[in-house]
Image: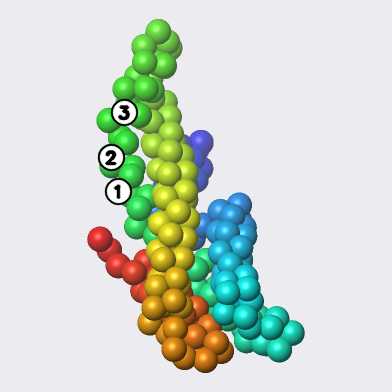
Amino acid sequence: MSNQRSAPRDDDLLLQDFSRNVTNKAWALFFGNAAIVSAIPLWLFWRIHQMEITSYFIHFIIGTAISTYFLNSAYQNMKFILKHKIAQKREEAINREITKLFANDKNANKKDKDDRILARKNEVADFEATTFSIFYNNAFYLVCLIVLSFFVFKNFSPTVNYLFSVGLSTAMVFLFSTGEK
């Protein structure tokens, strides 16, 4: 009877590892990073392009909110794509690590060892995919923002420059995060 109860639980854990849903902790981390990175253009346009915060308050709030939402989604998309690739690349090293741990334990069976390997592999892949997703998307967003703001839209009014620079940078990051390669 215990095998019947543990099988659905194991299946749920396995499905959770391969789903697009992120944990509350990861979502909060993504949202916090997205909010901070989305607020960076405020300083850029306030100090360098000399847009007054009070005059353009609505533009800044809307641009930052939309950018935060789509950056958060881009983080999640990129994490999902990367997690499986990283898990495959780290599998051999984690196998060796867990095998060394179980080498002296005569009471350990193969199922416990395999479960430990799978859990460790998912833990490592999840952490690495999360950090790389944040790094890659932030770098890509900020490079796009600077190029668009200072080179492409430099002759436009500051309002148009802000809206298009932030909007197109966010759209490019989001669209590139949905790709499979």
- Say which quarter of the image contains residue 89: top left
Callout 1: helix, strand or loop?
Answer: helix
Marks 1/3: CA–CA distance? 14 Å
Q: Which colour scheme is used?
A: rainbow
Q: Decide if residue 20 is in sight here.
A: no
Tell me the residue that label 2 is attached to. 89
Q: Where is residue 115 in the image (x, y as percent from the top left)?
A: 41, 32
Residue 121: percent from left, percent from top:
39, 37
- Distance between the Cα atoms at labels 1 and 2? 6 Å
Q: Quadrant of residue 180?
A: bottom left
Name the residue at 55% across, 87% down: 158
Q: In terms of sequence position, does the residue under pointer 1 or pointer 3 come before the other?
A: 1
Query: Which secondary structure lies at badge 2?
Result: helix
Q: Mark 3 points at which residue?
A: 93
Q: Mark 1 points at which residue?
A: 85
Label 1 with label 2: CB-CB less than 8 Å? yes
Query: Circle 1: is it few (<14), some (14-19), or many (20+) Cα within 10 Å?
Result: few
What's under tag 3, amino acid-wise? Answer: Ala
